[in-house]
Amino acid sequence: MSRKLLILAATIVGAHLAQAVFLGVSPTGTLVANLLEVSASVLAALTCVGASRRAQGMARPFWTLAGCGMAVWGVANLGWMYYELVLHTQPAAGSPLQFVFSLHAVFFAMVLFLDQEKDSARFEPEFLLDFTQIAIAFFFVFLGLYYVPSPHLLQQSVATRQLWMEFGEEFTLIALACIQIARARAPHIRNLYVGFALYYSVFSAGSALSEYHQSVQRTPTGTLFDLCWTLPFLWGAFWAARWQPSAASHAARSLGRKTLSGVVLTNAIFVLAPLIVLVQVAQFPSEWRILRFSLLGVSILCFAVRVGISGYREAKTAETVRRQALAMDSAADGISIVGENGEHIYVNAAFARMMGHESPESMLGVNWRKIYDARDIELLQDAVRKSLVAEGKWSGQISLWRRDGTAIPVEMAITTLANGVTACIGHDISARKEAEQARVDAENKYRTLVEQVAAISYIAELGIHGQWLYVSPQIEAITGYSQDEWLASSRDWTRHIPQEDHSVIEAAEAASLRGERFQAEYRIVRRDGAVIWVSDTAVVVSGSYSHPVMEGIIVDITDRKLLENQLQQSRRMEAVGRLAGGIAHDFNNLLTIIKGYAELALQRTGIQQELRADVQQIENAAERASMLIRQLLAFSRRQVLQPKVLDLNAIVLGLDKLLARLMGEHIEMLTRCGPDVGHVRADPAQIEQVIMNLVVNARDAMPKGGRLTVETVNVELDSTYARDHVSVKPGPYVMLAVSDSGTGMSPETVAHIFEPFYTTKESGQGTGLGLSTVYGIVKQSGGYIWVYSEPGKGTTFKVYLPRVAEQVETKPDPVEIRAAGKGSETILLVEDEEAVRELASRILSAKGYSVVAAKSTKEAEQYSEKYGGKIHLLLTDIIMPGTSGRELARRITARHPRTRVLYMSGYTDNVLAQGGVLEAGLSFLQKPFTPGALVQKVRDVLDSSVHAK
C-alpha cells in the first residue's frame, strides 16, 4: 500500500508542478489545480477510512472524524472552484462557502474531545450532543467575528480578520491536541494525538502561507502556492496509511483511570459551549433575534440532555458496581484485590475461608507476601510481573499459606486493574489434586494390568489424525516400533497401513465419531518390512474435562488370518471342483456321442480315404477333450479310483529313469528315498500322474537350468502343524516333496496355483490343469498338498499321504482279454440324454442284443413291472432326474433278482463311489466310451456272476 500511495502522491505533486509551469492561472490551469487539491483531500480521507477499519477502541472514531474533516474540506474546495471558473470571482466575505471551509475544523475539534477514559469504538448519544454543541459554537464564532462585521469593514480588513480568525481556530486545536498528548496514559492514544498535532501544524502552516499570498496577490488558483494545500493532505494520507493498531492497545484499556484533569476536560464542553453561545448571542444585533435565541435554546437543550444522560449512566454504573460487589462477595471462588502498596484492600468471604480466616475484615491491610508461599514469591515477582506488563493478566497454579500454617494448592488468575490495583481470583484445587493422584494410582494399576496382556492397549484422540496419548509396550513386540517412536508420529500412524486398507479404517473412524464402537481388521507393515494382520477394537469414552477419547486394544491376528485364507482357498477350490464336475458330466455325454459316431463311421466299409482322415481327426480331438475332462474330474475329485496299498518309494524309483529322460542336460535331478518309508493307500496310476505333473512343472520353472529334487520321508503332523494348516488332521503321513531352484512364485501366484486353467506359462505352452489335477488326486486320496515358494529362490511342493499299516498288495495274474462277440440277451437301457441313448441302443442292437431304451427311471420301472420275460442286464446312467441310477437298480433287481447291473456316467457324485473309491462288486463304465468299450464291458458283465446289491 505504501508503495502505491507513494507513486500516487508523486503523480499528484508532479501534476501540480507541470500545471503551474505550463498552464499557470489560466482557466484550464485553475481547473486542474483545484481538482488536484480535491484529489489530495479525498485520498487523505480514504486512507483515514482504511485506518478506521483497522482500528479498535477510541482510534476508530478518531480516524472516522479525521477523514470526515478532510472530506468536508474537499467538498468546500469544489464550491471554491465553482466561484472561480463559473462566476469568475472569489467567494464574498459573507458567502456560506466560507463557513463550509471552517466546518472541517468542527470534526477535528470532535477528535480532540473524544473520551480517552472510555476508549470506545462506538458513536454514543453523548457524541452527537457534543458535536451539535461544537458546531453551534463554531457557527456563532463565525457569525460574530467574521460574517456580521464584514459588511461594515474594508475588503483588506475583512481578509485580515478572516486570517486571524482561522489562525485562532487552528492554534486552539493544536493547543488542545498538546493537552491531550500530555494527559494521555495509553501509549497508543498518545501516538494518535502526536500524529494529529504534527499533521494539523503542517496544515495550518500551509493554509496560512497560501491565504496570505492570496490576500496580497489576489491571484486565482493555479500557482505553486497551491502545493501548500496539497502537501498537508498527502502528509495526512501517509500518516493514516502507515498507522497500525498497537497489539497492546486492547489490554491497555483496563489501565486507564478517572483523573481530575480528565473529568474537567471531558465535561468542559458541558459549560463552555452554552457560555460561548450566550456571550455571542448578547453581542448580536436585534435582527438576529430569532436565530440567536433558537440556537441558544438548542445549545441549552443539548446541555440538559447531556447532563441527564450522564446522570443516568452514573446511576446505572453505580447499580452495576453494587451488583458486581454482591456477586464477588457471594462467589464460590476466592477473590482479593491488592492495592499499589501490596496490601489487600478487598477480600471476599470465600477467599477468607480458603485462607482459614473467620471474616474478610481480618485480611484487609495484610501484605500479599505474608500469605503466599516463599517459593512462589520469586515466580510472582518475575514471570507474573512480565505477563502483567505484556498482557495485563496471568494464570497458573501457586501455593498459599493458611492461617494454621498449612499450604494449599490454588489455581490463581491475576489481572491488572486501574490505579495500579491488581485483582486475584483463586480456586482451591486440593480436592482435584487428590482426585488426580487417585486417578494416577488407578492408571498405574491399569497400566500394569494391560502391559501383561499379549496385545497393544492405547488411548487416542478421535479422528484418523488424532494424537495417540498412550500406547502399551507391546507395540514394540508386535510392530517393531518403540513406544516413543510410535507416539512421536502417531498423528500419521496410517502411514504404516497399506493404502488398500485405509477405507476400512476410515469407515471405523466415522463410526467412532458417531459414538459407535471402533472395529476394524487391517494390515500393518512392521519396522522390518513384514506385514501382519491386526484386529483393532475401541470404544469412545469421556477423557479429561469431558474431552472424548478412544480406548482400545489391538490384537495380532496374523495366524488366524492365515488359517482363514487357507479355509477360503479350500472352499473356493471345492466350489470350482463342483463346477468342473458338473461341466464334465454334460461334456462327457457329448464326447460319448462324438467318439461313438466317429468310430461307427470309421467301421463302415467303402468310406473314402479323405473322409476317413477327417473322421480320424474328429476322433483324435474327442480323445484330447476326454483327457481334459479326466483332468477336471481329477481336480474335482469325482473320478473313480481303484486304490491299493502302495510302496511310494517303489513308484518313485520306477519312474526315475523316465523322469530323467524328461530333464535336459542343464537340469540336475536328484532322487532321495527315505529308508523304511511307510505304505499308502492310493490309485497307482493317479500317484504316478501326480509325480509326473510336479516334475514337469518344476522343469518348466528352470528354463536356464538348475537342480530338481524328488524325495520321500515319513513324517508326523502334530496339532501345532494342524493349527497352522486348516483341514489337516494330525497323524502319521508319508511326504513326497518335489523341489526346484527355479524362478519361484509370488504370494499372489501361489494363491491361485491350484485353480483350473490358471497358468503362468505363455499361451499354447500349458492348459493350466496340471497342478489342479495334482490337487484333486491328492485330496481324493485323503492327503494334503502345500507349496512353499519365493521369487528367485525356487519352489517346493510337499504332498502328504496318510500312512497305513497294511502290506503292499500283490499284482494279480494278467487275464486274457477276449474279443467281445455277439449276444442275444435282453438289455434295459436307461439314459436321459437322447443322443447317448440312441447311440448305445444302436451299438448293442448291432451286436444282436435285444435293447429296450427308457429315457427316465420312471419309464424303466414301468417296463420292468409289465415285462414278463427275463431282463439280463440293466445298463443305466448314474445321474438321472428324480431317482438315481443306483436306486433304480435296487428296485429292478428286487423284482428281477437275476438281472445284472452295469452303471455308466461322466462322474459318480458319490452315488457309486464314496470319496471316488468304487464300491466292491459294482460294474462301472466311464464316459466318454467307444462302441468297442461298451460292447466289451457289456459282455464282461453278462458273463460275470450276478451282483444285485
Image: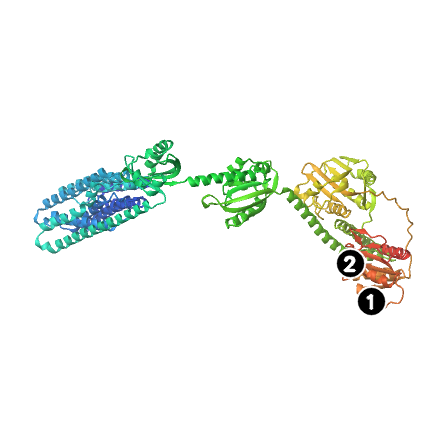
Secondary element under disc 2, as helix, strand or loop, is: loop
Amino acid type shown at disc 2: Ile
Local SS, label 1: helix
Q: Is residue 123 visible?
A: no
Which percent across, then down, holds residue 550? 52, 45
Mark 2 neighbour density, 10 Å: few (under 14) some (14–19) many (20 or more): many
From the image, tell me which residue sits under label 1: 862
For disc 2, the marked residue is 879
Q: Are marks 2 and 1 in contact (CB under 8 Å)?
A: no
Residue at mark 2 to residue at mark 1: CA–CA distance: 19 Å
* Vertical side of 512 occupied by 822: above or below: below
Q: Position of residue 278 (x, y in %)?
A: 12, 50
Which amino acid is tagged 1?
Gln
The image position of residue 32, as x and y in percent, is 24, 46
The picture quadrant where one finds residue 809 is top right
Residue 118 visible = yes
